[in-house]
Amino acid sequence: MMAVTNPASTSFVLLRVGERRFAFPANIVTELAPPVRLHTFPHASPLLTGVIVRRARIIPVYDAGSVLTGKRMMSHRFYLIARREFGKATELSAIPVDGECELATGEMQPPPPGQPNYVTGTVQVRDEMLDVLDLEALVTSQPARSAGELEPEATA
Amino acid sequence: MKPAIPESARLLHSRRAEQVILFTIGRQMFAIAAESVREIRSTDTLAGAASEIEFSEVEKVRHTIERGRHTYYVVNGCAHFRLRVVRPSLAMILREFRVVVLVDGIDRMAEIPAVYPLPRAFSGEERAWYRGLAYLEDHVIPVIHPGGFLTRDEFHRLDQAVLAAASLREMQGAAQA
């Protein structure tokens, strides 16, 4: 993970999903995990694809790509592990990401009008303006299209 | 400071070991506590004892079996878990519920060291289907909640359908006599 530092600003983890890069507040991210085995079983929860076992914990995996890009992620290089809060309890969540993540700092700006509710702002990193994501809103969003209509992400 | 991840979610946390039956529906493996299962039979041996429910309001139940003056409902496991329907070969008769589950195969019995809670992210019907998850030989296997095959409301609707069918048969018998 590379670091672009600016001590006066907030820290973000920059991740790639499909062709796009996004930012998560760094304080909810715990690690970037290798693509360990995905365990699947029947369920009726939208967006969840299964669970992974990481550091002796069972961690649910969300197909965030279907919300962010409208395409189901068929291949990925890492899992971004972040904390999701359920009332007073906290649970780890995994999101498949396509490339290495980067740690950066910057000032978060309000989101442009018309953004989905999971975009809580934007942050400029070098010459790139990235959407800052809210994990809770993201994983409770509906996929861009219904699951049966999602296009698979092209494999590398 | 963020709260720590609860220790209960960690696989290293030791709990009471449990004997389970590992079985398959479609290609999916499940575990159920051995003590929750009364009997496992071939579907062929049960075929003669099964009665069709003419107007079942519960799609996954098409047949009943009478056992010890109780009506057991035959739940198609594929339909229950919304898996691709295949022809089941075995019937698992539960102990504490009037349910017979059609499954595809029994893998083996095993001892699981613990049942870990289903992550809170799973918020759908699976919370009723599963007691939790087991981790066995590098596999995460859902552990069935035996009471999750039919809800109280479904039992009630099925009981009503069976009673209505019995009344109809009695009336038809009386009319013929």
Image (cartoon, coloured by chain):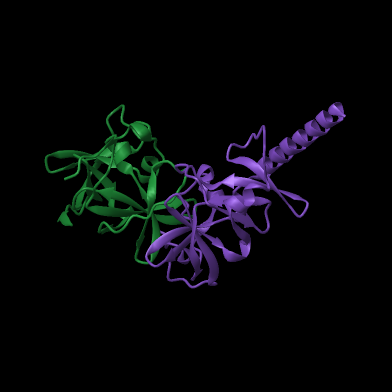
Q: Kindly identify the residue that appears in the image at 86 percent across and 30 percent down.
A: B174
Farthest left residue in view: A127
- Up-down: is B146 above or below B153? below
Relative placement, left or right, of A34 versus B25 is left
How far across and down, in percent of the image, does residue B158 sit? Answer: 69, 39
In this orientation, does residue B58 appear?
A: yes
Establish if B6 lies above or below B120.
below
How many numbered marks have been drawn onto this rendered protein structure? 0
Residue at point 53%, 47% (across, down): B77
Q: The green chain is which one?
A: A
Q: Which of B166 and B60 is in front in this view?
A: B166
Where on the picture, by quarter, is residue A140? top left
Task: Give left or right: position of A97 versus B116.
Answer: left
Residue A82: where, in percent of width, then height?
34, 54
Determine which quarter of the picture holds residue A119.
Answer: top left
Q: Chain B is drawn in which colour?
A: purple
Residue A129: quarter of image: top left
From the image, which quarter does the C terminus of chain B lie in?
A: top right
From the top left corner, tell me how far across and down residue B28 is, in percent: 43, 52
- Left or right: where A115 falls relative to A130: right
Residue B120 in picture, x, y percent from top left? 48, 52
Q: Which residue ends up furthest to the front in the rendered image? A: B177
Q: Which residue is drawn at 77% across and 37% down?
A: B163
Q: Is residue A114 above or below residue B6?
A: above
- Camera-side residue of B142 and B101: B101
Can I make out residue A120 in this image? no
Quadrant (top left/top right/bottom left/bottom right) for the N terminus of chain B: bottom left
- Of A152 and B79, nearer the camera is B79
Q: In this rendering, is residue A143 above or below A48?
A: above
